Image (cartoon, rainbow, N blue to C red):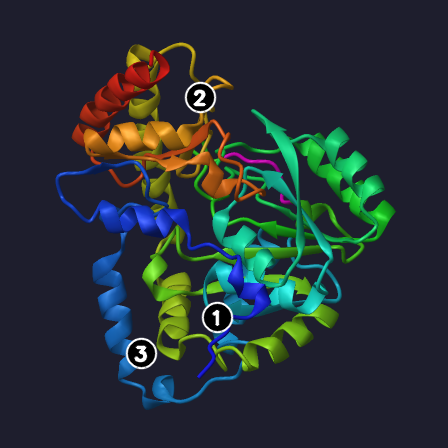
Amino acid sequence: MSRTITRRMANVKPSAVREILKVTADPSFISFAAGNPSGDLFPVEALREYSLDVLANPASLQYSVTEGYQELRDLVSERYGRGYNLKKPGDDTIIVSGGQQGIDLAARCLLEEGDAVICENPSFIGALNCFRMYNAELVGIPCDEYGMLLDELEVALEANPRVKLIYTIPTFQNPGGTTLPLERRRKMLELALKYDIMILEDSPYFELSFDGTFPPAIKSLDDSGHVIFVGSFSKIIAPGIRVGFVIAPDWLTSKMTVAKQGADVHTNGVYMRVAAEFLKNYDVDAHILRCRTLYKEKCGLMLAEMEKKIDKRVRWTKPGGGLFIWCELPADKPSAGLCETLKQQKVAIVPGVAFDTDPDNLANCGFRLNFSVPSNEQIISGIGLLAEGISEYLDK
């Protein structure tokens, strides 16, 4: 029997982050490679209580409508749609199986084979692999310490008539930790209107601001129906519940709903109801404040240790929220080699090629650090080992 993998999947590589996590299952490793929130912040007791209440109702175990449990849709529309001005006339809210599914459904509905997607470079590997699965051309736009360079974006839009989508994580970006300033958000929206293309705004981190402030979402600035907002409860409740949401024009959400029917019928019915109970009955803002406080402490500790210990030839971002710090080695030192050096010291980082729009760019000199998962003690000792590994690698 002949077995052939489809062309759309043949060249898609597994997530480097997931592969690294297999290595770091060894408890002797110090991992800065995770993309997870801190397990110390999971509201376990509340989720246990809400789960028992939900399971007492047999309706929670039945099939649900594809758009999502109506009460949760209403609560999301209230908190995010009205609370953050994300829902405009003609928009609808649907519940999806994590933010990743929101990205996938948007791509499935908007991209023909050979269309182009503009992304920050570096960008989230889950989104990049999703677009690759639809045989889209990825056009990477360089970033500075504030995010995507808008002059470069305009050049790319002018040069690529098949661009259908701008994909961006404008607030506490993964992997960069950067936040796009308001004037650049307005300019991005202006360009989307000028070239009549959609913006896919992926924003799972925006509430994790260390000081509670962040620029308005691009979606909140848009009255033309050119922005799709994808949000998630993975970072403020728990990723294991796999509940996210999309707020977008109803002409698109209606087709995303049809696409979702072919994918998973509906998001987990129990956890949609649990998420609804969480939004109704838990002090969500107090919980988010606890998240912000812990992540601010951990990020501050990591940055302080890096400042003290890491070779000054390395540059890094200083995020105002989220989960990540992005580092850059000198231009002639690809970070993949550093990862191999660090394995000997049982420290894990994610090399920049994992987040590159060109998956074969082995010359990529960036790497991502996560501060939410390791303990304070691991941050202190791990940054020390990282610094030693960097010095050894740069001086080879």
Task: Give, as a three-letter code, the residue at label 2.
Answer: Lys
Q: Kindly identify which residue carries mark 3.
A: 54
Side of 277 where 40 appears, left or right: left
The residue positioned 69% from the left and 37% from the top of the image is 185
**Between marks 1 and 2 in the image, the one whose residue lies nearer the viewer:** 2
Where are the magenta residues, as a range?
A: 213-217
Q: Give the mark, 3 or 1, whose residue is nearer the N terminus.
A: 3
The residue positioned 50% from the left and 70% from the top of the image is 5
Task: Give, as a three-letter code, the residue at label 1.
Answer: Leu
Is residue 77 among what the camera can see?
A: no
Residue 18's tag is none
> 52 or 311, which lies in front?
311
Q: Give the mark, 1 or 2, whose residue is nearer the N terminus.
A: 1
Q: Kindly identify which residue carries mark 1.
A: 72
Residue at the outermost front position:
1
Q: Kindly identify which residue carries mark 2.
A: 333
Side of 188 where 193 appears, left or right: right
> 204 or 312, which lies in front?
312
